[in-house]
Image: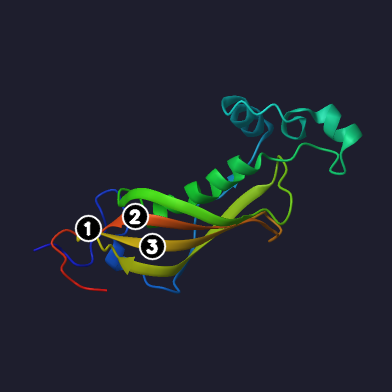
Amino acid sequence: MADMHATHPRGGLYFEDFEVGRVFRHRLTRTVSQMDNLLFSSLTLNPQPLHIDAHFCATETEWGQPLMNSLFTLGLLIGISVNDTTLGTTIANLGMSEVKFPAPLFEGDTVSATTEVTAKRASKSRPDAGLIEFLHRAFKQDGTLVAECRRTAFMRRRPLATTAV
């Protein structure tokens, strides 16, 4: 019989391990750089000068400097959460909603993140899986909220688990 408290060998939590209301304060943080912004924008074929042209930003925007690409910020936010939550146990991401960027993020800012479990239910079609809804939030070093989103993940159930939720 499977150990009902063991994490996945890679460290991720199984469906049964998540409790609605639990908040993870992730240990990993990341200082974002100009290279992150340039590389991500280039890899995604996004020529927006708001992200890659310092002169444009200094002379034609209210920010005076390039903004971090919002999709990079979103990816970083979710990426920071993986080690503490879903490493090796996610089957698939099913969707993201209510994505918001309430304050700007600039190169040199350091991002930290939290994840709250807001809902869970067993899969109706797969007894080996369940759905978890997360509310991810990213903050810069002064505590300002810079991004948040709801994400629904299709998660593995613990092997041999028969517990109904």
What distance separates the C-alpha of mark 3 from that of mark 1? 14 Å
What distance separates the C-alpha of mark 3 from that of mark 2? 7 Å
Assign the C terminus to one quadrant of the image.
bottom left
The three-letter amino acid code for the residue at tag 2 is: Phe
Give residue 36's position: percent from left, percent from top. Answer: 62, 33
Is residue 31 at all visible to an observer of this figure? Answer: no
Q: Measured along the vertical axis of the image, is residue 98 above or below residue 108?
A: below
What distance separates the C-alpha of mark 2 from that of mark 1? 10 Å
Residue depicted at x 78% and y 27%: 53
Q: In this view, does 80 lie to the left or right of 15?
A: right
* Disc 3 target residue: 132
* Disc 2 target residue: 154
Instruction: Rate crowding at label 1 as few (under 14), some (14 to 19) or many (20 or more) other CA atoms within 10 Å.
Output: few
Secondary element at image label 2 = strand
Q: In this view, does 33 lie to the left or right of 83?
A: right
The three-letter amino acid code for the residue at tag 3 is: Ile
Q: Earlier in the sequence, mark 3 or mark 2?
A: 3
Would you identify the image quadrant in which residue 20 lies? Answer: bottom left
Instruction: Tell me whether the residue at label 3 lies in contact with that at label 2, contact meaning CB atoms closer than 8 angstroms.
Output: no
Secondary element at image label 1 = loop
Residue depicted at x 38% and y 62%: 132
Residue depicted at x 72% and y 31%: 48
Secondary element at image label 3 = strand
Q: Measured along the vertical axis of the image, is residue 99 above or below residue 72?
A: below
* Disc 1 target residue: 126
Instruction: Rate crowding at label 2 as few (under 14), some (14 to 19) or many (20 or more) other CA atoms within 10 Å.
Output: many
The three-letter amino acid code for the residue at tag 1 is: Arg
